């Protein structure tokens, strides 16, 4: 055997070995960072964000702004910056934009963003979104919105912290991760619509949106077991995204994935009712993670003491696992379907 052939064989062996080691490390890392997501932190943050002090977080209200400041403090404390190209953690959403579509009278509100820059594929961006507004005060009662969407709000804070921990330890995502707290959802998905029409990162380089809206409770069809989550839209635009959602759950989490509301003929039309839709309608693969509607939905009784923190924690870990896979895989998600809107 010639020296050239021997050298080629040796190089191939080394490359195969490196690939195996990389895969083993990846699996070790994802489990490590999934485990870093803290039930105590979710409880602590939700107890503040869904407290009476925040006055129901109505879009543009002082209570919502106070909640926003608290959210930003969590990022500062964790060493998580606002995105490159932005001047602060805020994306201002003008009142004229908020009110134009429905001729309303909402005041100057803000999206809030945080950013974990990727490594070799940093120009590609994975968005993780949740709305932090709720419906405010009605007839003297504060609607604290602990599940809607305080649960999603605290979840994406923990997801950001897990990615930042990975980055600090030299194991950060290949693609950049944009954490996006959107405003105005309760009035018509305004904050996410504003972002997609005034995006900081071009939609062409936006790989996916993982959207979380209500993951802290159970609904009537699952009254005997909270080990489930509804998955909506994962297969509408990308087979890759559907496969990732399935595989991440099977490998790391073990929830029952319920596709009841994934049916495009479903009368509830949830696919069109949360912030992922503004990404999906622009051809960006999107998945909506959701616990379903319960008796306290949009009522003053949606309080922290009714949150099931074991379920909230497990679903947060699931959303992180999905995002990790999207952000670290070799190839970006393929859009192989065109009926997602």
Image: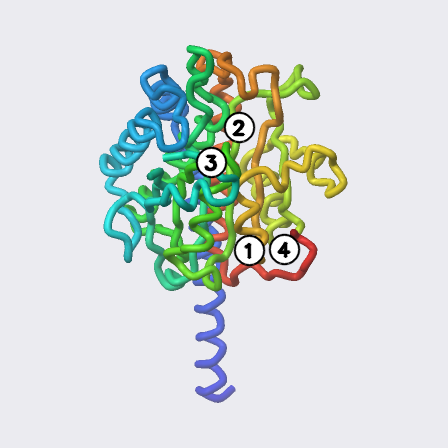
Alpha carbon distance from label 4 to label 1: 9 Å
267 left or right, relative to 302: right
Q: Secondary structure at mark 1?
A: loop
Q: Which residue is mark 3?
A: 104
- Which residue matches tag 2? 215
> Which residue matches tag 4?
238
Q: Mark 1 and mark 2 in contact? Answer it, CB < 8 Å.
A: no
Q: CA distance from mark 3 to mark 4?
A: 36 Å
Give the Cα separation between the discs numbered 2 and 4.
Answer: 23 Å
Query: Which residue is tagged 1?
Result: 284
- Say whether residue 206 is left or right of residue 239: left
Which tag, 2 or 4, sits closer to the chain's start? 2
Q: Is residue 36 visible?
A: no
The reply, left or right, for residue 236 in relation to residue 289 is: right
**Image quadrant assignment for residue 58:** top left
Question: Measured from the top left, where is residue 106 in percent x and y?
Answer: 41, 34
- Between disc 3 and disc 4, the foreground one is 3
- Sequence-wise, the earlier of marks 1 and 2 is 2
Q: Residues within 10 Å of mark 4 (few under 14, many from 20)?
A: many
Q: Secondary structure at mark 4?
A: loop
Q: Earlier in the sequence, mark 3 or mark 4?
A: 3
Q: What whole-number distance in Å separates the C-alpha atoms at marks 1 and 2?
A: 22 Å
How far across and how far down the image is residue 126, in percent? 45, 52
- Which residue is pictured at 54% across the width and 38% down the height? 252
Q: Which mark is residue 293?
A: none
Question: Residue 247's x, y, as percent?
Answer: 61, 45
């Amino acid at each position: 055997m010639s020296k050239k052939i021997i050298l080629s064989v040796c190089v191939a062996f080394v490359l195969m070995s490196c690939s195996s080691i990389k895969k083993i490390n990846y699996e070790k890392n994802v489990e490590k960072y999934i485990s870093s997501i803290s039930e105590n932190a979710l409880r602590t943050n939700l107890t503040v964000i869904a407290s009476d002090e925040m006055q129901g977080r109505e879009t543009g209200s002082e209570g919502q702004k106070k909640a926003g400041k608290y959210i930003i403090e969590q990022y500062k404390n964790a060493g998580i910056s606002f995105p490159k190209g932005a001047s602060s953690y805020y994306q201002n959403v003008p009142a004229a934009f908020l009110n134009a579509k429905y001729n309303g009278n909402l005041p100057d509100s803000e999206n809030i963003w945080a950013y974990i820059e990727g490594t070799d594929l940093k120009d590609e961006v994975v968005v993780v979104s949740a709305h932090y507004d709720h419906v405010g005060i009605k007839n003297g009662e504060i609607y604290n919105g602990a599940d809607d969407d305080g649960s999603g709000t605290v979840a994406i804070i923990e997801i950001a912290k897990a990615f930042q921990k990975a980055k600090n330890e030299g194991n950060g995502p290949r693609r950049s991760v944009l954490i996006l707290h959107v405003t105005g959802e309760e009035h018509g998905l305004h904050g996410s619509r504003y972002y997609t029409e005034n995006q900081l990162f071009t939609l062409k380089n936006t790989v996916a949106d993982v959207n979380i809206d209500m993951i802290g409770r159970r609904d009537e069809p699952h009254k005997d077991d909270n080990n489930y989550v509804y998955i909506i839209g994962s297969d509408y635009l990308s087979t890759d995204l559907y496969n990732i959602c399935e595989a991440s759950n099977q490998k790391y989490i073990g929830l029952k994935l319920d596709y009841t509301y994934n049916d495009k003929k479903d009368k509830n039309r949830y696919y069109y009712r949360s912030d992922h839709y503004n990404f999906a309608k622009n051809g960006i693969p999107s998945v909506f993670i959701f616990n379903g509607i319960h008796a306290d939905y949009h009522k003053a009784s949606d309080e922290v003491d009714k949150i099931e923190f074991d379920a909230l924690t497990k679903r947060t870990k699931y959303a992180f696992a999905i995002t990790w896979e999207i952000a670290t895989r070799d190839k970006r998600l393929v859009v192989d379907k065109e009926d997602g809107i």
